[in-house]
């Protein structure tokens, strides 16, 4: 048995639901009773054990045979990639290798495996077994926050992530969740260092979920999320150097750009779309339909782009003065 996100199952013809936005990645979840104690996650040992929930998404169970049959219709329906996620179990990554083999028999779509990996050799086995890339989730942006919401050693996970990124350039990613207690400066310093190591960063907004210890915690404030979204995008694209950003008490005070430069740099709205592996759009993973969209699962309309950029500009204007002429060389 494997769990498939409801939107993915609909694309594969396995479930009848009406979706506002179709996923462009097939999202799969293996395992229950995770050994981790992440206080934000419904799969955690610290939560009420909701096996059909991850993020705001429902994950109904299907057989591997149903999954295999669903790929043909899924590809015709627009699926471009597979994301195989696994909880941390006592069996390690062995079950994921078996499922990965079944996926490779059923489809030629590239596969990312996101799982708890203890050492580089496990990542090697997954890559040799057919994964195009692997993701080693940090989730928290600092050792302090990691210890509070996940437990264990941030430095060990960070070191493993960098080891793998250097062994397999362009094939390793991570997850960063904003709103867990980090400052904007801490999040951006980490992401900038990861970009320079070639790590793909999937950006999430903390989502309070029933049954988890952090169910009563507020999600990140939209202006703060937009600031970090915009800055991280410009850093990733090489349009802005971290040294040009100024901070006050951890909050972005200035982007080091004039309003016109900042609006031009963010034109098109890509900064506000879901970020992670290619073709990963995660529809409504963090959001309620009709509510504030932290990560747009599709291209923005002109009105949405204007609203998102205006929020960044307003936040920067309130934080401090703009500075002229500070775009990174070559932009």
Image (cartoon, rainbow, N blue to C red):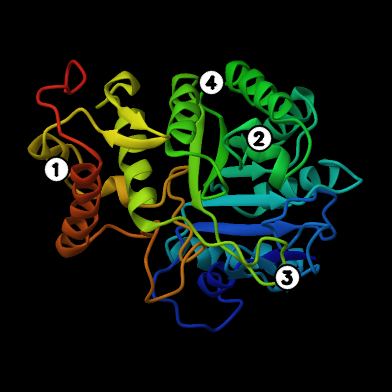
* Residue position marked by numbered label 1 in the rendering: 263
Q: Earlier in the sequence, mark 1 or mark 2?
A: 2
Q: Tag 4 or tag 1, which sits nearer the N-term?
A: 4
Q: Position of residue 264 (x, y in %)?
A: 12, 39
Q: CA distance from mark 1 to mark 2?
A: 34 Å
Is the Cβ of the residue at disc 1 closer than 8 Å to that at disc 4? no
Rendering coords of residue 61 (x, y %): 73, 72
- How far separated are the C-alphas under marks 3 and 2? 24 Å
The image position of residue 221, as x and y in percent, is 41, 57
Query: Pointer 3: what residue?
Result: 211
**Alpha-carbon span between mark 3 and mark 1:** 41 Å
Of the residues under marks 3 and 2, which one precedes in the sequence? 2
**Are the two marked residues, 4 and 2, in contact with CB atoms closer than 8 angstroms?**
no
Query: What number is the disc on residue 169?
Result: 4
Residue position marked by numbered label 2 in the rendering: 144
Q: For the point 10% across and 22% down, which residue is it?
A: 325
Q: Is mark 3 in CB contact (under 8 Å) with mark 2?
A: no
In depth, the one of 121 and 205 nearer the eye is 205
Label count reads 4
């Amino acid at each position: 048995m494997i769990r498939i996100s409801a939107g993915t199952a609909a694309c594969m013809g396995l479930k009848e639901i009406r979706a506002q936005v179709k996923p462009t990645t097939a999202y799969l979840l293996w395992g229950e009773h995770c050994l981790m104690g992440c206080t934000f996650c419904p799969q955690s040992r610290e939560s009420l054990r909701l096996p059909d929930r991850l993020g705001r998404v429902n994950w109904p169970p299907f057989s591997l045979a149903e999954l295999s049959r669903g790929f043909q219709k899924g590809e015709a329906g627009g699926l471009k990639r597979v994301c195989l996620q696994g909880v941390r179990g006592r069996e390690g990554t062995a079950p994921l290798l078996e499922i990965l083999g079944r996926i490779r028999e059923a489809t030629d779509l590239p596969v990312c495996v996101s799982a708890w990996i203890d050492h580089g050799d496990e990542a090697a086995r997954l890559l040799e077994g057919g994964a195009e890339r692997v993701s080693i989730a940090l989730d928290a942006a600092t050792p302090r926050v990691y210890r509070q919401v996940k437990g264990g050693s941030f430095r060990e996970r960070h070191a493993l992530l960098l080891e793998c990124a250097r062994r397999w350039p362009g094939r390793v990613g991570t997850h960063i969740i904003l709103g867990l207690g980090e400052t904007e400066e801490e999040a951006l310093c980490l992401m900038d260092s990861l970009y320079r190591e070639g790590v793909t960063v999937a950006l999430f907004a903390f989502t309070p979920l029933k049954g988890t210890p952090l169910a009563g915690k507020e999600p990140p404030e939209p202006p703060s999320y937009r600031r970090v979204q915009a800055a991280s995008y410009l850093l990733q694209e090489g349009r802005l150097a971290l040294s040009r950003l100024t901070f006050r008490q951890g909050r972005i005070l200035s982007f080091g750009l004039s309003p016109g430069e900042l609006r031009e740099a963010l034109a098109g709205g890509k900064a506000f779309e879901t970020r992670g592996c290619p073709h990963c759009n995660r529809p409504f993973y963090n959001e309620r339909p009709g509510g504030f969209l932290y990560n747009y699962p599709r291209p923005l309309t002109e009105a949405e782009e204007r609203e998102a950029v205006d929020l960044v500009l307003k936040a920067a204007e309130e934080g401090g003065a703009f500075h002229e002429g500070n775009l990174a060389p070559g932009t």
